[in-house]
Amino acid sequence: MLHKINVPDMHCENCVKRINNALCETGIKFEVSLESKTVTVDGCEHCLKTALSELEDLGFTPSV
C-alpha cells in the first residue's frame, strides 16, 4: 500500500539527503520528491508511522 506524506518544510537537496539517509536505515521502501515536497512510503501502517516518526525526529512537520 502506498502512503503519501506531505513535507512542506523540505526545501533543498540537503533536506532530501537527510531524509534519504534516515529512512534508508529503517528498511522502509520509499521515494522522496523535492518537487512535490512529498515522501511516498510503500508498506503497511507501521511503515507509515515509522517514517512519520523519523521525519519528525529530523525536525520536519510531516502530514498525511
Image (cartoon, rainbow, N blue to C red):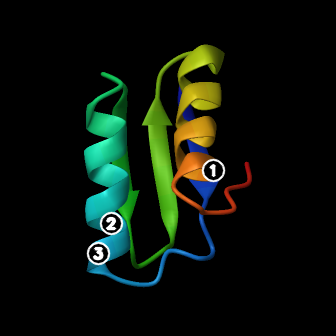
Residue beneath disc 1? 56
Image-quadrant location for residue 53: top right
Q: Residue 35: x and y, percent?
A: 41, 79
Residue positioned 32% across, 59% down in the render: 18
Of residue 54 and residue 64, the one placed in the foreground of this image is 54
Q: CA distance from mark 1 to mark 2?
A: 14 Å
- Asked whether, in this view, residue 29 is left or right of residue 1, the answer is left
Of residue 47 and residue 2, the one placed in the foreground of this image is 47
Of residue 61 and residue 28, the one placed in the foreground of this image is 61
Indicate the secondary structure of the residue bearing disc 2.
Answer: helix
**Residue neighbourhood size for the residue with mark 1, other residues' Cα within 10 Å, grouped as few (<14), some (14–19), many (≥20):** few
Indicate the secondary structure of the residue bearing disc 3.
Answer: helix
Say if 37 sits above or below 11 in the image. above
Q: Residue 59: x and y, percent?
A: 59, 61
Earlier in the chain: of badge 1 and badge 2, it is: 2
Q: CA distance from mark 3 to mark 2?
A: 5 Å
Q: Could you tell me the amino acid type at mark 2? A: Val
Q: Is disc 3 in contact with disc 2, using a CB cutoff of under 8 Å?
A: yes
Residue beneath disc 2? 16
Say if 62 sits above or below 28 in the image. below
Indicate the secondary structure of the residue bearing disc 1.
Answer: helix
- Asked whether, in this view, residue 62 is left or right of residue 35, the answer is right
Q: CA distance from mark 3 to mark 1?
A: 16 Å
Residue beneath disc 3? 14
Earlier in the chain: of badge 3 and badge 1, it is: 3
Q: Is disc 3 in contact with disc 1, using a CB cutoff of under 8 Å?
A: no
